[in-house]
Amino acid sequence: MKTSYHYIITLLILLLVLACQRSYTPKPRGFLRVDFPDKDYVQFDSVCPYTFEYPSYGKIVPDTDYITEPCWINIEFPDFDGKIHISYKEVNHNLNDFIEDSRTLTYKHTIKADAIIETVYTNPELGVHGILYDIKGNAASNLQFYLTDSNVHFLRGSLYFNVQPEKDSLAPVISFFREDIVRLMESFKWK
């Protein structure tokens, strides 16, 4: 009987000594690490009446939705399960309707949004004007924008990810793609 006690005590001491060799720090619940690619851009040019630079890690595909019109495209980001939807319309004395529709679609996110920040963009030399909407919070789309020449062309874009919105976990990804959308807007030209 004494031998079994000695055996158990020796085993417990051995376990305590081995267990104490590494210090353990409890960690809070976290999210997956995201490795971002290097920023590199390519020119999009097609039969559509616009051209712009987009990230090389994106892939341009035609929009195949049932309401699709000519020159509607998506920039897909397979590694992030997201895309930028881009729609184009010709302006026929209805620019205010398009701007109001864009604003309405953006502000539909106010139910989940903590704030919506509008940044006016203008490049008079190229005839490009618009607004970038930063939608803060757990909204389905955190970045939306429109660009127009105020006479003939109107283009609208919105960034979506195929995940449930979690502002804390998506914040670095949204910030990363915001730079790409700003680059798209700054390099945008009408043909």
Image (cartoon, rainbow, N blue to C red):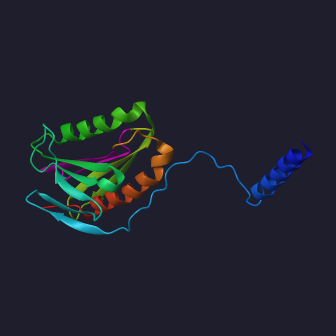
Residue 43 vertical position relative to residue 142 in the rendered view, above or below: below
| Residue at left offset 82%, top offset 49% | 12
Quick check: 161 left or right of 71? Answer: right
Q: Nearer the viewer, residue 161 or 19?
A: 19
User: In the rendered structure, does residue 143 fall within the stretch colored magenta?
Assistant: yes
In which quadrant will I find the C terminus? bottom left
Q: Position of residue 119 (x, y in %)?
A: 37, 51
Residue 57 visible in the displayed image:
yes
- How many numbered marks are there? 0
Q: Position of residue 114 (x, y in %)?
A: 47, 37
Q: Nearer the viewer, residue 1 or 18?
A: 1
Quadrant position of residue 45: bottom left
In which quadrant will I find the N terminus? top right
Residue 100 vertical position relative to residue 25 in the rendered view, above or below: above
Q: Which contiguous range is marked in magenta? A: 140-161
Quick check: 61 left or right of 178? Answer: left
